[in-house]
Image: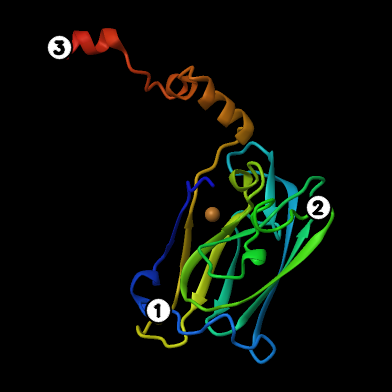
């Protein structure tokens, strides 16, 4: 798993210090359901005046923030509009293994044109994220925040904001990976940050 993204929530750090108090065994049928449908598709996006193919969730990058409530049950329908398989991993969420979403490890992939409904009790709070765990789909846009509100609010706030920080490149992530692996200093050259032995010698290093 590549953890290149930093998720921040302005309110996250202090709100949720208490430990989960519920066990998985809480009856799913009695709990309230927090339900979402998310749809993964390929679309043209334009962040740099240069339209490129990207992967969106419900038409956006980042994916929509899923707001859940501790003590409820999450029911999330994932639709795959791609012509290739996909997956969604609920990063950092305590859940039954089969709902974890990592293809070929805990959960079967969602086939092209297929869908899967994930369902799990929400036994924790705080800010997390979700992302595709297939190929480099996450790098192309399939990531978003999960905000789980605690049972008991311990900090009074007027308004919560969720901030998702990520980077973007118009280049195909596969090409980025290839360039990085080839060890040709491609990106250092491009940014003019190539180390120069001659420059270092001249500077008396
Ligand atoms: Cu992850």
* Marks 2/3: CA–CA distance: 59 Å
Q: Which mark is residue 19?
A: 1
Which residue bears the numbered disc 3?
Answer: 204
Of the numbered discs 1 and 2, the one sitting upstream in the chain is 1
Which is nearer the N-term, disc 1 or disc 3? 1
The residue mark sitting in front, 1 or 3, is 1
Q: Earlier in the sequence, mark 2 or mark 3?
A: 2
Estimate how packed mark 1 is, as few (under 14), some (14 to 19) or many (20 or more) residues with alpha carbons within 10 Å: few
Residue 134: image location, x then y, percent: 67, 47
Query: Disc 1, disc 2: CB below 8 Å?
Result: no
Q: Tell me if residue 125 comes above or below residue 145 in the rendering.
A: below
Mark 1 element type: loop
In the image, residue 110 sits, relative to residue 184, either above or below, namely below
Q: Nearer the viewer, residue 122 or 186?
A: 122
Helix or strand or loop: what does disc 3 sit on? loop
> Dots 2 and 3: beta carbons under 8 Å?
no
Tag count: 3
Residue drawn at (61%, 54%) of the image = 61
Q: Mark 2 packing: few (<14 Cα in 10 Å), some, or many (20+)?
A: some
In percent of width and height, residue 30 lies at: 66, 92
Of residues 48 and 90, which is closer to you in this image?
90
Does residue 148 appear left or right of residue 131 in this picture? left
Write down the residue under mark 2: 111
Q: Residue furthest bottom?
A: 30
């Amino acid at each position: 798993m590549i953890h290149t993204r930093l998720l921040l929530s302005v309110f996250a750090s202090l709100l949720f210090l208490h430990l989960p108090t519920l066990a998985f065994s809480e009856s799913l049928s009695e709990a309230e359901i927090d339900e979402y449908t998310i749809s993964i598709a390929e679309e043209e996006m334009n962040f740099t005046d240069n339209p490129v193919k990207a992967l969106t969730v419900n038409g956006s990058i980042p994916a929509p923030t899923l707001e859940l409530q501790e003590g409820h049950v999450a029911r999330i329908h994932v639709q795959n509009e791609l012509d290739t398989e996909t997956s969604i991993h609920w990063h950092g969420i305590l859940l039954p293994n089969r709902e974890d979403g990592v293809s070929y490890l805990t959960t079967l992939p969602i086939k092209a044109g297929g869908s899967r409904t994930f369902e799990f009790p929400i036994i924790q709070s705080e800010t997390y994220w979700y992302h595709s765990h297939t190929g480099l789909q996450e790098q192309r846009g399939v990531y978003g925040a999960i905000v789980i509100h605690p049972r008991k609010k311990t900090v009074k706030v007027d308004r919560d904001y969720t901030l998702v920080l990520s980077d973007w490149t118009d280049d195909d992530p596969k090409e980025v990976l290839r360039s990085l692996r080839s060890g040709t200093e491609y990106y250092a050259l491009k940014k003019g940050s190539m180390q120069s032995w001659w420059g270092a010698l001249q500077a008396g290093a």
